Image (tube, grey):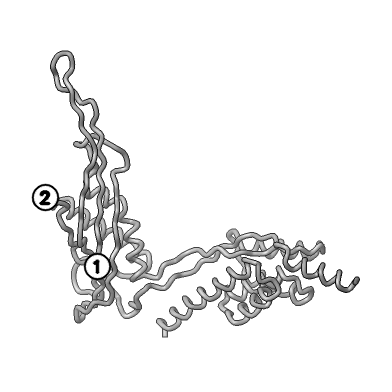
Amino acid sequence: MKKKLISLIMVAAIILPMFAATAVFQRKKPAKLDLTFANSIAFYPVITYAPKKGETFDKEQNDLGKKFISALSDYGTKDGKFVILNGKSDIAIQVSFKSFDVKDSGVTIESKDSAGNTVTVKDEWTRQISALMEVMVLKTEDNSVLVTEEYKFFGVNSNPTPKAMLMSPEKIVEDQISSFAYQISEIIFDTPYNQAVTILDTKSKDKAIKEKMKSAKKMLSGKNLDYAAAEEIYKEIYESTDDIAAGYNYAIMLQVRKDFDNAEALIKKFAEQDPKNKAFKRALEDIEKDRAETEIFKSRNQ
């Protein structure tokens, strides 16, 4: 009976939720296209269509095209690519608005005052823009299309306003240009991002272990990052005590230096002991994501 009780206590210690913190690791998402052969990217003039038949909005559309190009070019210069607007290039990007519709809705109510003058009682309008934007990436050597993507666009004049003061279609679209430019940049540029990862705190009562774990966690945040030193601490604690939190954190450090096989083996071991622990499940998913991105970069740099 005593042996069974001890076993139950050990199992409970494993499945009880662990205290956790979060560390943020910098990574890169590979571009959708492999453009390692390209040294320059050109942007063709943006093709836009009149919001309504019989209305041209030429000036607004030209301004929109220039601003769109400027926003997208920013991602190229930040990534170290040489971006040009005119002249010879390896890659060209064509942005087209396949549809562009403006819908105004509201009410204007006028009345006569005591002197017989016309006065506006109510003049409240909103403007909605809906569009379908096509982005085509071409190889300029033979004008072949590498990829075509479509994006649905929806924008609105944020607050009711007098009809004469409605925001221009160009301005409504302009407010969302940076968001669309980011989506397009993911096609052609590798995108840096921050990945939040769970770091577990030990449940050990041993003061020395708790202090070591605390010092290792400090090495994973702030300005003075030291992943190698943190890994050594977690490894030493895990191998000498079988502390699950230390072992899990050690696996995360293995992942940081791209030792995916050993990191995955350790996390799977802990997940088998505690299949309901969400931290282990998330860690395994993140290892696979990190591994896949790393393999893409390796294949493109060969």
Q: Is residue 18 left or right of residue 264?
A: right
Residue located 21% across and 61% down the image? 97
**Position of residue 90 measured from the top left corner of the image (x, y, whole percent):** 25, 76
Q: Is residue 259 above or below residue 63?
A: below
Label 1 neighbourhood size at 10 Å, few (<14), some (14-19), many (20+)? some
Q: Are marks 1 and 2 in contact (CB under 8 Å)?
A: no
Q: Nearer the viewer, mark 1 or mark 2?
A: 2
- Residue at numbered disc 1: 84
Q: Secondary structure at mark 1?
A: strand
The three-letter amino acid code for the residue at tag 1 is Ile
* Residue 270 relative to residue 167: left or right: right
- Crowd tier of the residue under label 2, counting other residues whose Cα lies within 10 Å: few below 14, some 14–19, many 20 or above: few
Element carrying mark 2: loop
* Amino acid type indicated by mark 2: Glu
Horizontal and vertical percent position of residue 170: 22, 50
Q: Which residue is farthest bottom?
A: 302
Whole-percent x, y for residue 296 in the image? 44, 79
In the displayed image of the protein, which residue is found farthest to the right?
A: 2
Quarter of the view holding residue 200: bottom right
Which of the 4 image quarters holds residue 66?
Answer: bottom left
Q: Which residue is mark 2?
A: 55
The one nearer the camera, 151 or 177, is 151
The numbered disc on residue 207 is none
